[in-house]
Amino acid sequence: MKAAERQFTTISGVPIEPVYTERATDIGSPGEFPYMRGIHPDMYRGRLWTMRQFSGFATPEETNRRYHYLLEQGQSGLSVAFDLPTLMGYDADHPMSEGEVGKCGASVSSLEDMEILFRGIPLGEVTVSMTINSPAAVLWAMYLAVAEQQGVDLAQLSGTLQNDILKEYIAQKEYIFPPKPSMRLVTDTIEFGARNAPRFNPISISGYHIREAGSTAVQELAFTLRDGIEYVDWALARGLDIDDFAPRLSFFFNAHSDFFEEVAKYRAARRIWACCMRDRYGAKNERSMKLRFHAQTAGCSLTWQQPYNNVVRTALQAMAAVLGGAQSLHTNSLDEAYALPGEHAVTIALRTQQVLAYESGLTAAPDPLGGSYFLEDLTLRTEEAADRYIRQIDEMGGMVAAIDAGFPQSEIAAASYRYQREVESGDRVIVGVNRFQSDDEPIELLQIDETSAVHQAAKLAALRTRRDNGKVRRALDALRRAAESTENTMPFLLDAVRSYATLGEICDALRAVFGTYQETTHL
């Protein structure tokens, strides 16, 4: 095909014209409403983004050693990955946990495990992000209890709880309870955080997993922001004032490979959210209108073929996140298409961020790409397309209703199918996969064997022997009664974890009240 006949598009299929000229729009200045150019006037001139490598594997003891290593290498915040049994609310010795303990994150079944996870790490000084969703309130209660043991005032804690259950129904599928009781638990954490831990973000509304499931950039943006609107609506229905909790809502986006499309997505996100908070909800505090986000480079873009190409992909994606104005960033490791990152690979990933921060010159100007005709046009088109999705979901009755109807799920599935067809046909080039193939170089991989499961099961057996089991039963009974009522469950969850009730026991108590969720297939 001749170059003149070829149709250029973004990864998401947005047509790209050969020439762009100025569009009539006021993009404003960094730090000014609607914050399209960044939420701070000086951006990284005043403060760099937080370098937060996602990490967790095997046992809490081994993960704790990795955290100390990363902090020694210059990482500025911790991000906790939990294994699949923990994500699904099962103890490490439960039959459903067999073969999965410690394989995709740290195994945490009790307050004792959380104590070990943060041993020697001052929680009053280090920000901590936890990637946990359906049992998020339980794991947060464990974290808060450890902070209490360290003598840290909860009001001084800083970090983020992922806690975004809606994207589980949409994309990742790691849910326990049905949507409405799950939303009740999320709202409990938002309310408790606003009153007791005002510096901690009780939720990170996550587009990352939506994009990893195969969505377009517009779908990631629209569904994530509409999820945010849903959480706001539930918190307002609880009786909270918008400016009491909105400043602590945070977001989590994917950083994919189409450089300009990603930058446009982040800029459009800030403007949509700012206008929504001001015009839809009447927020007065400017911090309520400022969309703060964490970005992670695209795991779905990494390939097991020619894995060293992943270093280049990650650097490009990280640069898009920086030029898009991220507040914190995780860079994936070259080996993640095979396994959890090894120490050498994760160090290269961290060094990638440090080179961008200290050697590239990207941080000198608050918005280096602002004013690009192409970028501004792409930002406006991204915003307009996302707004159409948001209005459509509004008309369906909100995101919970849209999920019940299978709407976002089917939209993502269709987009994923289109993209895969492009890769398989060769219309979409993936270097080393469908073009420029070669023999792969062997790489060193992190191996997690079954000794982690044995170790964790032994610890649980010893814990159940020495704890006050009568106190545990009373705490779980009180939690069940609270779940049956309209009381905020967080104080009861704190009492349960302080008694050393396990994650599985606590989730079983909630399962007895809320039931579990089974997705319905929508054809």
Image: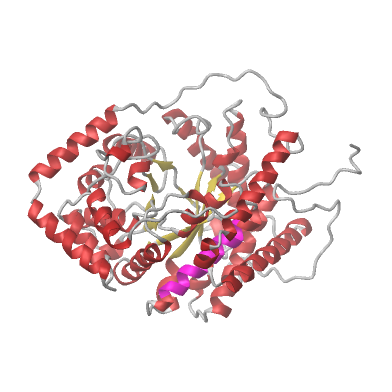
Task: Judge from the rendering whether residue 272 lies leftward or rightward of residue 170; answer left or right.
Answer: right
Q: Residue at x 49, y 49 (%)?
A: 172
Asked if residue 23 is positioned above or below residue 504 in the image, the reply reads below
Residue 304 placement (x, y as % from top left): 57, 28
Task: Judge from the rendering whether residue 118 lies leftward or rightward of residue 347; answer left or right.
Answer: left
Q: Residue at x 37, y 39 (%)?
A: 105
Let me know if residue 268 is in the magenta part. no
Q: Nearer the viewer, residue 3 or 173?
A: 173
Let me know if residue 231 is in the magenta part. yes
The answer to whether residue 241 is seen in the rendering is yes
Looking at the magenta stretch, what is its main secondary structure?
A: helix
Residue 168 placement (x, y as % from top left): 47, 54
Residue 384 placement (x, y as % from top left): 70, 66
Q: Residue at x 37, y 53 (%)?
A: 176
Task: Judge from the rendering whether residue 71 lies leftward or rightward of residue 396; answer left or right.
Answer: left
The answer to whether residue 362 is seen in the rendering is no
Q: Quadrant of the N terminus?
A: top right
Q: Which residues are magenta?
A: 220-235
Q: Residue at x 57, y 74 (%)?
A: 276
Asked if residue 88 is positioned above or below residue 37 in the image, the reply reads above
Q: Quadrant of residue 219?
A: bottom right
Residue 111 placement (x, y as % from top left): 21, 49
